[in-house]
């Protein structure tokens, strides 16, 4: 019989401690360490020198399918983020804030797949079957042949995946959510680190053995990270985050890990009365309420995964009476803003240290790439001087500590997206040449290699960058 060991696990990050303490040294959370019993790796009496079964290895160049088949839902934004559809046997973890729309999105995707002949099982551990039916009726999906169940016992769920003679094999399993699942031979409560890890491991092992795609819904902490042990994100093949501001109707599905597709890919949805609606042209949507005649507004040509996107960067610089002026940022990295402000003061001689600075990425979207530096710097210069930027000009480029403007990836896609929406000019890093004469004919560019040149471009009121080319 296996020996039972008592360990102390942090319920926030999964760190193991030799004894109980009030604070976790790994994540800094308080009152999150709980005692849990688990079996030892080597049962009592087992010989340490006993040999295992020999594993059979195969050649890397063995002939196989050139392209693995996928389950394509037809929801283009969801399929884009998943890499072109769900791969059979894959495990996907999707997390997001409460009420952001995770269950709604998955129900729409499952219903779309089931109408194409894919057998889908939807297991809810948080809602009753009638509650899921009510949501499906509100979304107009009651006619979809999805099989519903309300269960939390992993042993029962695994047994239900077995198919008898004449039954269609299960192709997709949705677990909503993994924090409600439990394995009955473990004494700890559902949602603890041991239960979450063991439940996910058992379901993933069974799903891969039967070639079933499985989607887990995961809760998030107050910091926006998926709750539970970090090993949960390593066990699955793809990790998706469903983001959005409740004050806006936009929702962003972002891939941070994907073994079967590109990472940092995003899908844009709009929350409507009938559920989540795809946004095919998010650039036009994010710029629909922009006023180009206001100082402090710049358009950034960003790149999220493989998708170019134009967003508005808004900046406001106001005189401050505080000893430490405020730096408020929404949708961007605050440390990056502090760096850009320091470069503008040191390399360009602009006086921003005595100003309260507010920066906002309009539309509720979050931008993570360094290419936003030039757009943020242009918006700050415009807000400080009171001169509006040319309304038909986009900006992108990375700024270094010496004030140099560095090149960024995929300038062609950014310029094409700007030209498609009617923009005439672009401020880009020097030597960031575009490929193809067609792109050069669509949009005129102004190259800058230093932030001082960027500040000089807007020294005179009414100066047009679009006409500089």
Image: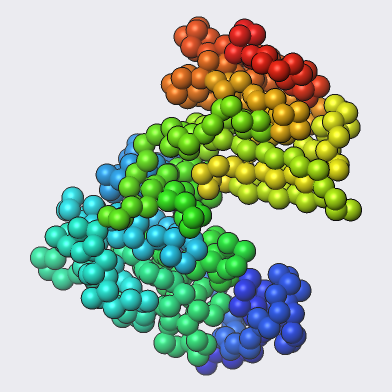
Give percent across and percent down for residue 306. Answer: 49, 34
Looking at the picture, does residue 46 appear above or below residue 249?
Answer: below
Please indicate whether residue 205 sits to the left or right of residue 449 in the image.
left
Looking at the picture, does residue 291 appear above or below residue 161?
Answer: above
Quadrant position of the C terminus in the picture: top right
Looking at the picture, does residue 361 appear above or below residue 434?
Answer: below
Instruction: Using the rendered image of the protein, determine whether residue 444 is visible from the camera's viewpoint.
Output: yes
Q: Residue at x 34, y 65 (%)?
A: 174
Give percent across and percent down for residue 263. Answer: 52, 44
- Residue 357 image-quadrant placement: top right
Q: Nearer the viewer, residue 10 or 170?
A: 10
Q: Residue at x 23, y 69 (%)?
A: 134
Please indicate whether residue 250 sits to the left or right of residue 296 in the image.
left
| Count of all numbered marks drawn on residues in the image | 0
Give percent across and percent down for residue 344. Answer: 82, 32
Residue farthest left in this picture: 166
Please indicate whether residue 376 sits to the left or right of residue 171 in the image.
right
Q: Nearer the viewer, residue 115 or 390?
A: 390
Q: Nearer the viewer, residue 380 or 131?
A: 380
Figure colour scheme: rainbow
Q: Residue at x 74, y 84 (%)?
A: 22
Q: Residue at x 43, y 82 (%)?
A: 183
Looking at the picture, does residue 62 appear above or below residue 226?
Answer: above
Give percent across and percent down for residue 4. Answer: 59, 91
Instruction: Using the rendered image of the protein, determine whether residue 149 is visible from the camera's viewpoint.
Output: no
């Amino acid at each position: 019989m296996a020996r039972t060991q008592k360990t102390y696990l942090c319920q926030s990050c999964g760190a193991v401690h030799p004894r109980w303490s009030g604070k976790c040294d790994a994540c800094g959370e308080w009152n999150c360490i709980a005692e849990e019993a688990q079996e030892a790796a080597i049962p009592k009496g087992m010989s340490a020198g006993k040999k295992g079964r020999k594993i059979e290895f195969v050649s890397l160049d063995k002939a196989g399918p050139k392209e693995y088949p996928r389950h394509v839902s037809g929801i283009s934004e969801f399929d884009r983020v998943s890499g072109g559809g769900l791969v059979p046997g894959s495990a996907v973890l999707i997390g997001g804030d409460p009420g952001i729309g995770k269950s709604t999105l998955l129900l729409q995707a499952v219903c779309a797949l089931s109408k194409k002949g894919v057998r889908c099982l939807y297991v809810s551990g948080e809602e009753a079957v009638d509650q899921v039916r009510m949501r499906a009726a509100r979304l107009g999906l009651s006619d979809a042949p999805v099989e519903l169940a309300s269960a939390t016992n992993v042993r029962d769920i695994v047994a239900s995946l077995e198919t008898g003679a004449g039954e269609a094999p299960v192709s997709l399993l949705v677990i909503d959510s993994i924090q409600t699942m439990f394995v009955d031979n473990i004494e700890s409560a559902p949602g603890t680190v041991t239960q979450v890890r063991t439940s996910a491991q058992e379901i993933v092992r069974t799903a891969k053995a039967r070639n079933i795609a499985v989607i887990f819904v995961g809760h998030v902490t107050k910091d926006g990270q998926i709750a539970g042990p970090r090993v949960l994100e390593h066990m699955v093949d793809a990790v998706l985050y469903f983001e959005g501001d409740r004050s806006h109707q936009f929702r962003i599905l972002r891939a941070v890990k994907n073994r079967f597709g590109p990472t940092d890919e995003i899908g844009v949805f709009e929350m409507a009365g009938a559920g989540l609606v795809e946004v095919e042209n998010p650039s036009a949507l994010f710029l629909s309420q922009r006023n180009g005649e206001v100082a402090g507004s710049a358009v950034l040509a960003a790149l999220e995964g493989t998708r170019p996107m134009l967003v508005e960067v808004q900046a406001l610089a106001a005189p401050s009476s505080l000893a430490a002026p405020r730096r408020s940022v929404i949708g961007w990295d605050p440390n990056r803003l502090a760096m850009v402000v320091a470069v503008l003061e040191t390399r360009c001689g602009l006086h921003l240290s005595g100003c309260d600075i507010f920066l906002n990425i309009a539309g509720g979207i979050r931008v993570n790439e360094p290419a936003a530096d030039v757009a943020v710097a242009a918006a700050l210069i415009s807000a400080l001087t009171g001169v509006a930027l040319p309304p038909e000009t986009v900006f992108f480029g990375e700024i270094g500590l010496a004030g140099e403007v560095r090149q960024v990836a995929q300038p062609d896609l950014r310029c094409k997206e700007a030209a498609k929406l009617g923009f005439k000019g672009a401020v880009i890093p020097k030597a960031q040449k575009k490929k193809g004469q067609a792109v050069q004919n669509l949009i005129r560019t102004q190259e800058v290699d230093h932030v001082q040149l960027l500040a000089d471009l807007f020294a005179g009121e009414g100066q047009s960058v679009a006409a500089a080319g």
